[in-house]
Amino acid sequence: MLKGFSDWLMEKGRADGTQESYALNVELYMRWYRDSFGSDMTELLHSNILDYRSYLQNIERQKAVTINAKLSALVSFDAFLIETGRQKVSAVSKKDLLKIQATYTRLGDVTEKQVEAFRQQILIESSKRDYALVTILAYAGLRISEARSLRPEEVDLVGRQITVSMGKGNKERVVFIGDKIINAVREYLKELDPDSELLFPGRAGEKLDRSVANKLCRRFSDSITPHSLRHFFCTNALEKGYSFHEVANQAGHSNIHTTLRYASPTSAAMKEKANKL
């Protein structure tokens, strides 16, 4: 059933990371069901979903955002079961997610100084491929799934733009790039196999495993991740004069409210203000 769910998510154009996390969260629910009732789950029932939510809240004491991520996976799994005829009545919806008070501190606190020190360390101690990859993540704001899918011809160094053809929801967009990316990619292309179909190929010419990027970040930083580099891009772009709509367009945000969160003050700034009260 999980294999069918993963295939269904792929058909819906969900990113690789989403497919993996949703499948894992559904598997965790199935494990909880088996431990609770001594049998395998055959269908989703709303009462069970509420019990599971309560278990995560009161026994596991997980944060609301973590619980909602698990419930969101079950919402998609519920849609999959109904669409494929495995279930007739919906058992869970977004109404079952926990209410979370909106945060007014921006999504990422990674500074430009930290990013530049991080890139320099990779330039010196790692490879041109790794340097080009993190530069694209930091200064083009691509999702790691988008960077892994890039083809060499989609990075136009003369036209100074990247065509993201495998964006979230299979939406295509054009991201304009500056000298930092152009210089990093130009140097990297000198050693890339000219017959490579991917800009960042992994083993046997397949997509670079996302764990490679995660391990790279952990190797050179305690705070920077592939996703925090995307957050940095959005915050940095706004600070450098991009409009909200320009950042939303470049980052591929489907909702402008996502972009607005990057204009909020940092948590450090909020703490400093609170100390003055």
Image (cartoon, grey):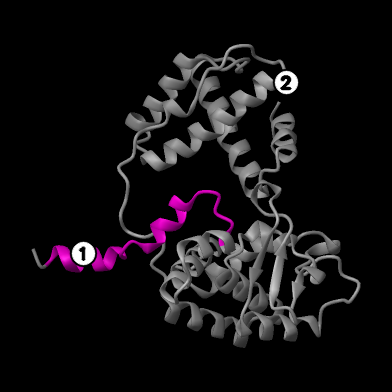
Which residue is at a point 51% across and 79% down the rendered structure image? 118
> How many residues crowd around disc 1 within 10 Å: few (fewer than 14), some, or many (20 or more)?
few
Q: CA distance from mark 1 to mark 2?
A: 50 Å
Q: Determine whether the residue tagged by mark 2 lies in a helix, strand or loop.
A: loop
Q: Type of residue at label 1?
A: Lys
Magenta stretch holds residue 154: no
Looking at the image, which residue sits at the far top? 88
- Residue 42 makes an appearance in the image: yes
Q: Type of residue at label 2?
A: Thr
Q: Is residue 236 above or below residue 94?
A: below
Q: Determine whether the residue tagged by mark 1 lies in a helix, strand or loop.
A: helix
Which residue is at a point 75% across and 35% down the rendered structure image? 7
Q: Is residue 269 above or below residue 20?
A: below
Q: Tag 2 or tag 1, which sits nearer the N-term? A: 2
Where is residue 191, by image quadrant?
Answer: bottom right
- Residue 107 makes an appearance in the image: no
Magenta stretch holds residue 253: yes
In this view, the residue in front, 159 or 191, is 159
Q: Residue 77 location in percent, x, y?
A: 61, 28
As drawn, is 247 to the left or to the right of 272? right
Which residue is at a point 70% across and 36% down the rendered structure image? 6
Q: Give the position of the C terminus as an image quadrant.
A: bottom left
Q: Residue 208 location in percent, x, y?
A: 73, 62
Which residue is at a point 79% across and 81% down the rendered structure image? 189
Q: Which residues are magenta?
A: 251-275
In this view, the residue in front, 36 or 58, is 58
- The tag on residue 271 is 1
Where is residue 38, by image quadrant?
Answer: top right
Q: Mark 2 = which residue?
A: 84
